[in-house]
Image (spheres, grey):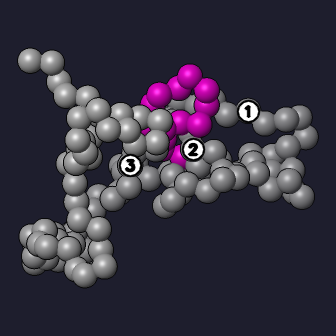
C-alpha cells in the first residue's frame, strides 16, 4: 500500500479523493476517482476542491462517477501482503557479510589511530578525564 496522497492545491492538507486531468486538444477537464498512482501531469484533489472545481471560459468539465465509499482491500491485496510478510520472516537474520562486501560499522566510530597523530588535516585527541 502506498502513502496517502494529499490534495494538490496549495495550503490544503486534506487527503485526495479525486484526480483531475486536462485534455488540452478538446478544452476539457476530466475529474474522476483517485488514480491508482500519482502521475506528473495530473492533480489530486480533496473532496472540497473537487466539488468547487471551475475551469476557464469555453472549457468543459467531464465529471466521472465517484465511488460512494473508498475501495477496501480485496483478497488479492491481502494475499500479496501476507506473502510479503512470509517472505520477510523467512529471510535469515543478519549474518557475517559475504566475501567482498563491507561490514557494518557503528555510526561515528573513531578510527584506530594513536593520540595526537594526524590524518590529513584532522587529528584524533583523547577525551579529557
Q: Which one is closest to the eye, mark 1 or mark 3?
A: 3
Nearer the N terminus, badge 2 or badge 1? 2
Residue lying farthest to the top in this orientation: 129
Circles 1 and 3, Cβ within 8 Å, touching? The answer is no
Q: Quadrant location of residue 87?
A: bottom left
Q: Residue at x 85, y 43 (%)?
A: 59
Q: Please tell me which residue lies in front, 129 or 106.
A: 129
Q: Which residue is mark 3?
A: 3
Q: Which residue is mark 1?
A: 54
Crowding near the residue tagged with mark 2, few <14, some 14–19, many ≥20 C-alpha atoms within 10 Å: many
Q: How far apart, in angstroms, are the residues tagged by discs 1 and 3? A: 28 Å
Q: Residue at x 41, y 34 (%)?
A: 122
Vertical relation: 115 (above or below) 24: above
Q: Which residue is mark 2?
A: 44
Vertical relation: 52 (above or below) 82: above
Report whether 92 appears left or right of 26. Answer: left
Amino acid at each position: 500500500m502506498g502513502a496517502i496522497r494529499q490534495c494538490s492545491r496549495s495550503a490544503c492538507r486534506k487527503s485526495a479523493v479525486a484526480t483531475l486531468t486536462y485534455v488540452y486538444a478538446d478544452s476539457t477537464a476530466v475529474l474522476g476517482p483517485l488514480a491508482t498512482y500519482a502521475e506528473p501531469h495530473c492533480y489530486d484533489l480533496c473532496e472540497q476542491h473537487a466539488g468547487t472545481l471551475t475551469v476557464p471560459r469555453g472549457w468543459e468539465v467531464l465529471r466521472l462517477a465517484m465511488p460512494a465509499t473508498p475501495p477496501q482491500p480485496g483478497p488479492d491485496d491481502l494475499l500479496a501482503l501476507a506473502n510479503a510478510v512470509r517472505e520477510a520472516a523467512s529471510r535469515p537474520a543478519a549474518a557475517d557479510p559475504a566475501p567482498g562486501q563491507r561490514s557494518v560499522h557503528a555510526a561515528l566510530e573513531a578510527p584506530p589511530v594513536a593520540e595526537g597523530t594526524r590524518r590529513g588535516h584532522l587529528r584524533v585527541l583523547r577525551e579529557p578525564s
